[in-house]
Image (cartoon, grey):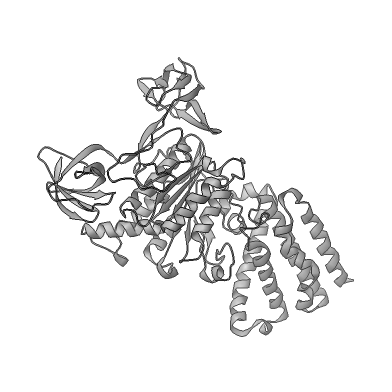
């Protein structure tokens, strides 16, 4: 126990009673309302508590109790489809706020049909599946906590408060409680090999992310970070989606809460919400709860990863999370570094992204949006995030203003995962050489574009003008994607390979005709078949990919005429 001696916004200083020994990150119940907080500092008989709820009305002298455990969340069947706040409390779809101090944590309700996969007397390994509970087509797998003999196992209807099995001397329940700050075991980590497919060509083909990888989406206000993350959440081929709205504007989260429950899952035909967990922590909620919301979301992801599922975590935005840390550290009197951020900023960012990984069973992929003030990518949060993520999708204000979607700047973006997943892609086609050709063409085009902006297109020699047209063709026909077009909103890997083959076919014919006949570039690139190439992304759907071969034959027929 203790008593409040100082209140500074969400930071409360507590005088610890004699004999009481709180530990770092222990949960505390603060004041007469029992507000939830965490011990973040202990010194000279006093503890500093970071309170995760509004502290208006707290008075000096009110009592504080310590729970003896870290901030945790109860995980079990039924958590998919729920909306949680930063503390793991269930938020109603009606949008009503939870009263301060009210415990409304997620907990499995009712009875469940447990189906055993092993028998009593069997020896099981740690993490082995004992059985599962199926809800709305999703299997929640119940795992063995230790390697030992199954002493008892019960199939049939079970209550969340009753053990379904006893392994060794451990009772196993359909739910489990996990501390949000403690990562899951990493001992079974493996090298990433499989891509997380998003259906967005510029990401999948040029700057891919692997299942178990991490990526950042930096961009200034209005560049489309939230739209891109929502698109990724809908189309990525992960088994489970965890979407974290951290410090975002209330109207943006309202749109998500309205749209997500209605979205159809493109893979199962069921509602997308049935395999999604939403964590809402808007900008008008207590600033300190932003920090816990990120850790909470990753803990939920690790729960499903341990079952063997691939999980994608969308965090929007980690900049708001870092700003919350800055405010809290300032109130605690910590020594600031650049732009007022705490000295622990780098290690805190690392603690998020390093929880991503591919494992023998399951994976956690983390994609975090970053909102640098004024679009300045040199600011601390963006710079440190870049160090710890394997893919960097830089959004460009100029592209966004010209309604180019996704507004990913191909010259400021990169991915370290292309070399790890190239074997997967090469099974579909000549991915490696197609990607290298496209990257080289874009790099040459960037150099020429600077000259065009300065001197105009007509200042270029004919051979460079041809390369510039090739660059523009790739941008318009491949990189630009219409999120509202029923065909173009998603491109399968096979379609992406075929589209790239068509574009390289056009490039080869352009250069061949120009070298052998010296025909003016404007005449070469203005053939009617090129308009078909520009429209192929919207006119060739996934059911008729053979039309790309017909398009290549038509291209060959048109340009063979020039060589006769």
Q: Is residue 525 above or below residue 2?
A: below
Q: Residue 163 location in percent, x, y?
A: 39, 22
Q: Say which of 514 and 109 sits in front.
A: 109
Q: Is residue 524 above or below residue 18?
A: below
Q: Is residue 516 above or below residue 258?
A: below
Residue 142 lies left or right of residue 338; in this view the side is: right
Q: Residue at x 47, y 21 (%)?
A: 157
Numbered label tally: 0
Q: Residue 531 location in percent, x, y?
A: 76, 67
Q: Residue 19 location in percent, x, y?
A: 11, 37
Residue 30 in which image quadrant: top left
Which quadrant of the rendered structure holds the N terminus? top left
- Note whether residue 389 is visible: no
View extreme (left): residue? 18
- Note whether residue 505 is visible: yes
View extreme (top): residue? 121
Residue 426 lies left or right of residue 334; in this view the side is: right
Residue 459 lies left or right of residue 277; in this view the side is: right
Which quadrant of the rendered structure holds the C terminus? bottom right
Q: Is residue 449 above or below residue 336?
A: below
Q: Residue 390 location in percent, x, y?
A: 49, 54
Q: Say which of 244 and 201 sits in front.
A: 244
Q: Say which of 315 and 525 sits in front.
A: 315
Q: Residue at x 41, y 32 (%)?
A: 108
């Amino acid at each position: 126990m203790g008593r409040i001696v100082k209140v500074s916004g969400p930071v409360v200083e507590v005088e610890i009673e004699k004999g009481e020994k709180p530990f770092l990150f222990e949960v505390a119940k603060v004041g007469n309302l029992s507000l939830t907080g965490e011990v973040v500092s202990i010194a000279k008989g006093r503890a500093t508590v970071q309170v995760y709820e509004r502290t208006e009305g707290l008075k000096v002298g009110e009592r504080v109790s310590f729970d003896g455990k870290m901030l945790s969340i109860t995980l079990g069947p039924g958590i998919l489809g729920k909306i949680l706040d930063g503390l793991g409390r269930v938020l109603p779809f009606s949008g009503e706020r939870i009263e301060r101090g009210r415990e409304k944590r997620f907990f499995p309700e009712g009875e469940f049909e447990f189906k055993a996969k092993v028998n009593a007397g069997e020896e099981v390994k740690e993490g082995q599946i004992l059985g599962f509970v199926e809800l709305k087509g999703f299997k929640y797998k119940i795992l063995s906590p230790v390697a030992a003999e199954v002493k008892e196992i019960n199939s049939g209807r079970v209550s969340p408060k009753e053990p379904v099995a006893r392994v060794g001397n451990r009772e196993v329940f359909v739910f489990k409680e996990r501390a949000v700050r403690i990562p899951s075991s990493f001992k079974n980590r493996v090298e990433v090999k499989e891509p997380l497919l998003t259906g967005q060509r510029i990401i999948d083909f040029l700057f891919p992310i692997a299942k178990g990888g991490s990526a950042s989406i930096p961009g200034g206000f209005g560049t489309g970070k939230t739209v891109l993350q929502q698109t990724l959440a809908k189309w990525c081929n992960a088994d489970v989606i965890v979407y974290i709205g951290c410090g975002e504007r209330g109207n943006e989260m309202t749109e998500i809460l309205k749209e997500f429950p209605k979205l159809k899952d493109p893979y199962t035909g069921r509602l997308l919400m049935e395999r999604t967990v939403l964590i809402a922590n808007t900008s008008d909620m207590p600033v300190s709860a932003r920090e816990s919301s990120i850790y909470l979301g990753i803990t939920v992801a690790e729960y499903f990863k341990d079952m063997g599922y691939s999980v994608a975590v969308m965090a929007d935005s980690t900049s708001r999370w870092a700003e919350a840390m800055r405010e809290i550290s300032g109130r605690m009197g910590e020594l600031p570094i650049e732009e007022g951020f705490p000295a622990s900023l780098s290690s805190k960012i690392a603690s998020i992204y390093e929880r991503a990984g591919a494992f023998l069973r399951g994976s956690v992929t983390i994609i975090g949006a970053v909102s640098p003030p004024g679009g300045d990518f040199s600011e601390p949060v963006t710079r440190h995030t870049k160090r710890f993520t394997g893919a960097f999708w830089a959004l460009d204000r100029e592209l966004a203003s010209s309604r180019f979607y996704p507004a990913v700047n191909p010259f400021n973006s990169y991915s370290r995962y292309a070399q790890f997943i190239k074997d997967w892609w090469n099974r579909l086609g000549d991915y490696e050489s197609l990607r290298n050709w496209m990257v080289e063409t874009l790099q040459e085009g960037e150099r020429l574009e600077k000259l065009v902006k300065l001197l105009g297109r007509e200042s270029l020699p004919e051979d460079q003008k041809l390369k510039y047209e090739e660059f523009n063709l790739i941008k318009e026909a491949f990189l630009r994607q219409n999120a509202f077009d029923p065909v173009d909103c998603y491109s399968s890997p096979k379609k992406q390979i075929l589209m790239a083959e068509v574009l390289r076919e056009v490039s080869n014919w352009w250069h061949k005709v120009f070298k052998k006949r010296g025909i003016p570039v404007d005449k070469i690139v203005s053939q009617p078949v090129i308009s078909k190439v520009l429209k192929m992304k919207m006119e060739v759907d996934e059911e008729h990919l053979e039309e790309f071969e017909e398009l290549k034959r038509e291209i060959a027929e048109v340009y063979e005429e020039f060589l006769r």
